Image (cartoon, rainbow, N blue to C red):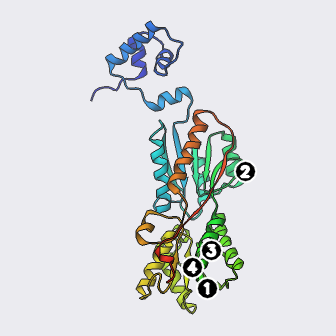
C-alpha cells in the first residue's frame, strides 16, 4: 500500500514551514505568489489530499454536529433527521447521532457530555436541567434545542397545547359527544401540553370528561408512543366498560395501533368510531388518518439553518421560535 502523504511531506518537498502549507491550504492572503506555486507544485507531485477536519481545526471551526435524541427508529424522529441530513448536504459539516434512549434521556445525555463536549450540539425532545444547561453554557459551543425550551438557548418548540386543542375541536365539530384519549407513559411538557389543550377544549364545548376513556397502553417502548400502546389502550377501554365515539391519539403510531384493534373487533372507521392522530407522518396519508401536522422535516432543516448561522457567522444571539401545528382532516374522523 502506498504511503499516505501528509502536510509534513508537502512542507519538506516545498522547503517551507508547515504553517506556510496550512496558510496556503486555507487560502490565506499572507503568502507570496511564488511560495503558493511552490507549495501547490509539491501538493500535485505528492498527490496530497488534505483532511477536511484538519483544515477546519486550523480555522478553529466546528466540524461535527452531535445530534442527541431519545430514539431514531420512530417515524417522527426519522422525519426530523431527514430534514437535518438534507440541509447538511449544503454545508461542509458532518453529524453524529447519539441515541439517549427514552427511559432517562437527561441522565444519558450527561454521560455523553462526560466523554467530551462536541463542536456543536442539536438536542431533540430532551429537556435540559440546570446541570446540563450550566455545562453547555460554560463550554460556549453552539446549541439548538428542538422540541424543548430553555431560557439561555436557541430553540424551536412545537405549540403542543394548541395541537391538542385543535384535535379535540375538530372531533367536537364532527359531532362526537364521547371522546377518549390515548396518553403516553412519559411525564413531559410535550405530553402534558397536548393533554391540557385537549381537556380544555372539551370543557369549553361542555363535552363530558370521562376518565375511563383517558388511558395509556401497557407497553413502555418509546414512552408509550407506539402501535402496541395504541392497540392495548383499546383493550383497556373495553375492559372498563366500552369505547367512546372517537379516540384522540397523542401520536400517529398510537393511532395505527388503535385502528388495528378496532378493525380486529369488527368496528368500522369512521362509521362506528372516529380516530385522530398527531404528527402527520407519511403513512398517515395512506391510511386516511386525520392528524396534526408538526412539519418535522421542515423543523429539522430550520434547526440546521440556525446552527450553521451560529457556527459560520459567530452569531451569539438567542433565537427562540414556536412552531404552529396544523389540522389535517382526513377520512378517519369524518362522522357519517
Task: Tell us which disc is closer to us: 2 or 4.
Answer: 4
Q: Quadrant of residue 187?
A: bottom right
Nearer the N terminus, badge 4 or badge 3? 3
Q: CA distance from mark 3 to mark 2?
A: 31 Å
Closer to the chain start, of discs 2 and 4, is: 2
The residue positioned 48% from the left and 46% from the top of the image is 96
Q: CA–CA distance between discs 1 and 3?
A: 11 Å
Secondary structure of the residue carrying numbered label 4: loop
Report the residue marked by disc 4. Answer: 174
Q: Tag on residue 177?
A: 1
Secondary element under disc 3, as helix, strand or loop, is helix
Q: Nearer the viewer, residue 187 or 301?
A: 301
Q: Residue at x 56, y 86 (%)?
A: 244
x and y, in percent, of residue 88 in the image: 47, 42
Q: Secondary structure at mark 2?
A: loop
- Neighbours of disc 4 within 10 Å: few (<14), some (14-19), many (20+): some
Mark 3 lies on residue: 169
Q: In the rendered structure, which disc, 3 or 2, sits on the residue that comes first in sequence?
A: 2
* Tag 2 residue: 151
- Are the residues tagged 2 and 4 within 8 Å (C-beta)? no
Amino acid at each position: 500500500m502506498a504511503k499516505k502523504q501528509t502536510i509534513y511531506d508537502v512542507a519538506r518537498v516545498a522547503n517551507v514551514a508547515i504553517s506556510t502549507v496550512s496558510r496556503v491550504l486555507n487560502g490565506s492572503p499572507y503568502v507570496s505568489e511564488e511560495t503558493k506555486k511552490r507549495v501547490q507544485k509539491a501538493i500535485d507531485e505528492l498527490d496530497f489530499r488534505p483532511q477536511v477536519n484538519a483544515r477546519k481545526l486550523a480555522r478553529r471551526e466546528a466540524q461535527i454536529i452531535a445530534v442527541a435524541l431519545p430514539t431514531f427508529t420512530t417515524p417522527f424522529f426519522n422525519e426530523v433527521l431527514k430534514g437535518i441530513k438534507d440541509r447538511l448536504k449544503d454545508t461542509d459539516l458532518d453529524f453524529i447521532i447519539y441515541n439517549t434512549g427514552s427511559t432517562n434521556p437527561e441522565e444519558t445525555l450527561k454521560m455523553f457530555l462526560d466523554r467530551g463536549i462536541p463542536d456543536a450540539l442539536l438536542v431533540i425532545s430532551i429537556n435540559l436541567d440546570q446541570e446540563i444547561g450550566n455545562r453547555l453554557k460554560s463550554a460556549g459551543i453552539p446549541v439548538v434545542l428542538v422540541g424543548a425550551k430553555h431560557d439561555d438557548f436557541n430553540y424551536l418548540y412545537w405549540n403542543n397545547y394548541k395541537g391538542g386543542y385543535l384535535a379535540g375541536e375538530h372531533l367536537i365539530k364532527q359531532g362526537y359527544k364521547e371522546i377518549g384519549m390515548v396518553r403516553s407513559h412519559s411525564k413531559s411538557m410535550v405530553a402534558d401540553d397536548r393533554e391540557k389543550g385537549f381537556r380544555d377544549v372539551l370543557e369549553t364545548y361542555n363535552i363530558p370528561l370521562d376518565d375511563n376513556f383517558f388511558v395509556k397502553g401497557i407497553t413502555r417502548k418509546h414512552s408509550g408512543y407506539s402501535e402496541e400502546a395504541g392497540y392495548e389502550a383499546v383493550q383497556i377501554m373495553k375492559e372498563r366498560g366500552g369505547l367512546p365515539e372517537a379516540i384522540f391519539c397523542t401520536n400517529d403510531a398510537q393511532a395505527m395501533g388503535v385502528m388495528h384493534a378496532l378493525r380486529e373487533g369488527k368496528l368500522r372507521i369512521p362509521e362506528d368510531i372516529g380516530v385522530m392522530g398527531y404528527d402527520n407522518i407519511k403513512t398517515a396519508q395512506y391510511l386516511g388518518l386525520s392528524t396534526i401536522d408538526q412539519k418535522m422535516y421542515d423543523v429539522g432543516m430550520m434547526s440546521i439553518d440556525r446552527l450553521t448561522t451560529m457556527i459560520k457567522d459567530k452569531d451569539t444571539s438567542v433565537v427562540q421560535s414556536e412552531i404552529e401545528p396544523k389540522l389535517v382532516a382526513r377520512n378517519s374522523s369524518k362522522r357519517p
